[in-house]
Image (spheres, rainbow, N blue to C red):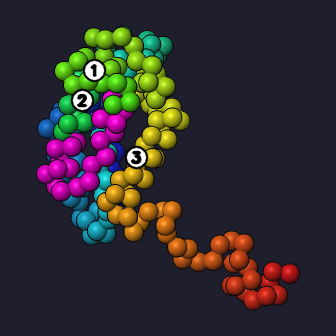
Amino acid sequence: MMVFFGANDACLPGSETGQHVPLDSYKQNLRGILQHRSVTTQRPRLILVTPPPIDEYSLEASDTAKGRLGVGRKAEYTMLYAEACKEVGQDLGLVVLDLWAIFMEAAGYEPGSPLPGSKKTNRNAVLDRLLSDGLHFEPEAYKVLFQSTMDVIKREWPEEDPTQLQFVHPSWVAAPGQLHGPESSK
């Protein structure tokens, strides 16, 4: 089970979207979801996914097109939510897929330098390819998320690697003859 929250929570306080969730509340909400009886009763294998970075350049254009006047998100602020997500995962002993770090590594981020996606540096071509409007995923970003998820599954639970799982039931090609006898495939 994947829990992937925080991108909208990380809006700036007072942003026009009204989606801002204070950082401490965000952490408390994540804990509440992850420790809720309806989740823990099933004993799922949990993957907590950090919110990805944002691109302020694309967001500004998108927000302007929607008639929004103020700045609604900042790259540095979103980073705080990714760090908080990792902290919650570590505290609870969960597997964390650090999508923020994966995207930032692809974007060429060097710790100590301005964050790609921030207006404190030049526009980043990698984030342009990953994020359609500075927030939402392009197909390439979904591919990164998928591959990263598969890598986590293979590393943490190799017996659950989808490429190694056996069929529980016959494939659709074989099923008619096996389920209903030879005459059903005629």
Circle on res. 148: 3
Q: Position of residue 92 (x, y in %)?
A: 16, 55
Residue that carries the numbered disc 1 in the rendered image = 115
Label 1 – label 3 distance at C-alpha: 21 Å
Residue at horizontal 38%, vertical 64%?
158
Q: Position of residue 182 (x, y in %)?
A: 79, 88
Q: Earlier in the sequence, mark 3 or mark 2?
A: 2
Q: Nearer the viewer, residue 70 or 6?
A: 6
What secondary structure is marked by label 3?
helix
Q: Nearer the viewer, residue 168 or 69?
A: 168
Residue that carries the numbered disc 2 in the rendered image = 79
Q: Which residues are magenta?
A: 85-104
Residue at horizontal 49%, vertical 25%?
129
What secondary structure is marked by label 1?
loop
Quarter holding residue 145: top left
Say which amino acid is labelled 2: Met
Q: Relative to 116, say whether 46 is above or below.
A: below
Q: Position of residue 154 (x, y in %)?
A: 39, 58
Label 3 – label 2 distance at C-alpha: 19 Å
The N terminus sits in image quarter:
bottom left
Count of numbered tags: 3
Q: Position of residue 10 (x, y in %)?
A: 27, 30
Q: Earlier in the sequence, mark 2 or mark 1?
A: 2
Q: Nearer the viewer, residue 14 or 52?
A: 52
Counting other residues with Cα less than 10 Å from the Cα at mark 2, is it few (<14), some (14-19), or many (20 or more)?
many
Say which amino acid is labelled 3: Ser
